[in-house]
Image: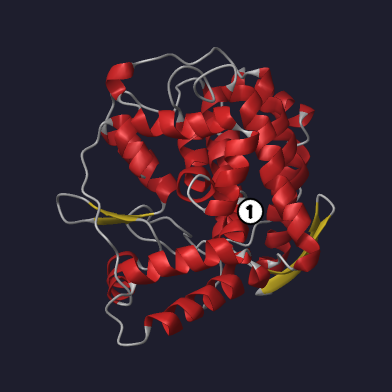
């Protein structure tokens, strides 16, 4: 959200969330406890970055980051969803799997977020590392047999982005789009911050690291343009979405439909054992379908042809029925129905 506010020129003040006080506050105001949250000047609270950004786009007409072009709009929504929900996996893995990152971040987060708890700091840090690994890495399907495959996701992502950012400043041209904001989530606060992935980023993808800084420094006054249509070099990312992310969403749909809290799935030849279910990601899949189905001709057949070419169309519709809750996430961004991942439920 910080990158979005900066790109749009929206003034904001950043405040630290404290635990457990903020958890209670979020549940009372939003129905769910998750980060980040935003409080508007009129006192209303908001959650869910995707929904918040789309709401702000309707409120501030100048310098929007979601293109009017239907194909580019859908691409941005798809890339944002992919970066937010799939690249989260290698981001959390690198943060908590290796001691160098886990000890650094547990110290930082305990000192900043839970400093008021009456317990020894060393115990709080140990407990945080245990909780995060149990909820978001080893406890979310990334066991020993999935480590190499999870890290390969990051390596391929760097190759894909490095080729793009060696040619232009942002994913769709010389100014940021929603796709850039989506990718900034795992990059700005994880890959370009945590010690292990940052060193890999420095060595293997300097143009991508420069993009992280360029996005942070962008202001509406800098202007810029988007290219026409969908650049060909986005294709490898779409291949990845069709080969890995959408099949994962379908495996998650099956788990939710069967009432399972965890599930096993082999995705792109990587065995994830005991991955946590996510009702929220069922809704994400439904939203992508709804966006495509709302598209008028001639844009829709063109987008469907693009998705089919990169192996995305069939997995997008591989499950005929989606196990959504009644009115699931209908209150976003002001009230959420479900958390992103079923941890501590």
Residue 260 percent coordinates (x, y): 69, 74
Residue 205 percent coordinates (x, y): 61, 33
- In the depicted structure, whether residue 46 falls above or below residue 83: below
How is the model colour-coded? Answer: secondary structure
Q: Looking at this rendering, what residue extends furthest in the bottom direction?
A: 119
Q: Residue at x 54, y 17 (%)?
A: 168
Q: Which residue is drawn at 34% across and 16% down?
A: 223
Instruction: Classify residue 298 as left or right of residue 26.
Output: right
Residue 157 percent coordinates (x, y): 66, 38
- In the depicted structure, whether residue 205 falls above or below residue 2: above
Q: SS for tag 1?
A: helix
Instruction: Classify residue 13 as left or right of residue 309.
Output: left
How many numbered markers are drawn? 1
Q: Quadrant of residue 135?
A: bottom right
Label 1 environment density (alpha carbons within 10 Å; few <14, some 14–19, many ≥20): many
Q: Nearer the viewer, residue 84 or 309?
A: 84
Q: Residue at x 50, y 18 (%)?
A: 173
Residue receiving disc 1: 90
Q: Can residue 202 be seen in this view?
A: yes
Q: Looking at this rendering, what residue extends furthest in the left direction?
A: 42
Q: Which of 116 and 3 is in front in this view?
A: 116
């Amino acid at each position: 959200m910080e990158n979005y506010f900066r790109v749009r020129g929206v003034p904001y003040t950043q405040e630290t969330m404290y635990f457990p006080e903020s958890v209670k506050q979020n549940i009372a105001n939003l129905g769910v406890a998750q980060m980040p949250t935003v409080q508007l000047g009129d006192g209303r609270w908001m959650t869910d970055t995707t929904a918040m950004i789309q709401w702000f786009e309707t409120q501030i007409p100048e310098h929007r980051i979601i293109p009017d072009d239907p194909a580019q709009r859908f691409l941005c929504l798809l890339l944002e969803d992919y970066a937010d929900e799939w690249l989260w996996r290698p981001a959390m893995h690198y943060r908590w799997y290796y001691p160098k990152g886990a000890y650094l971040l547990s110290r930082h987060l305990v000192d900043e977020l839970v400093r008021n708890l009456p317990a020894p700091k060393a115990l709080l840090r140990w407990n945080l590392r245990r909780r995060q690994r149990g909820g978001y890495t080893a406890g979310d399907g990334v066991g020993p047999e999935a480590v190499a495959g999870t890290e390969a996701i990051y390596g391929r992502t760097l190759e894909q982005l490095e080729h793009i950012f060696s040619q232009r400043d942002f994913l769709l041209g010389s100014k940021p789009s929603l796709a850039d904001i989506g990718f900034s989530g795992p990059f700005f606060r994880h890959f370009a911050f945590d010690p292990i992935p940052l060193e890999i980023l420095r060595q293997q993808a300097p143009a991508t690291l420069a993009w992280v800084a360029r996005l942070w420094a962008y202001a509406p006054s800098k202007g810029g343009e988007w290219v026409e249509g969908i650049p060909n070099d986005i294709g490898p990312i779409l291949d990845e979405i069709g080969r890995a992310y959408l099949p994962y969403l379908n495996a998650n749909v099956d788990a939710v439909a069967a009432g399972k809290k965890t599930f096993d799935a082999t995705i792109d030849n990587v065995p994830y054992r005991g991955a946590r279910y996510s009702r929220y990601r069922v809704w994400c899949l439904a939203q992508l379908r709804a966006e495509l189905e709302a598209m008028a001709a001639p844009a829709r057949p063109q987008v469907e042809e693009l998705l089919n070419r990169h192996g995305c169309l069939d997995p997008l519709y591989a499950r005929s029925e989606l196990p959504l809750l009644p009115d699931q996430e209908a209150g976003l961004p002001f009230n959420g129905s479900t958390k992103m991942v079923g941890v501590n439920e």
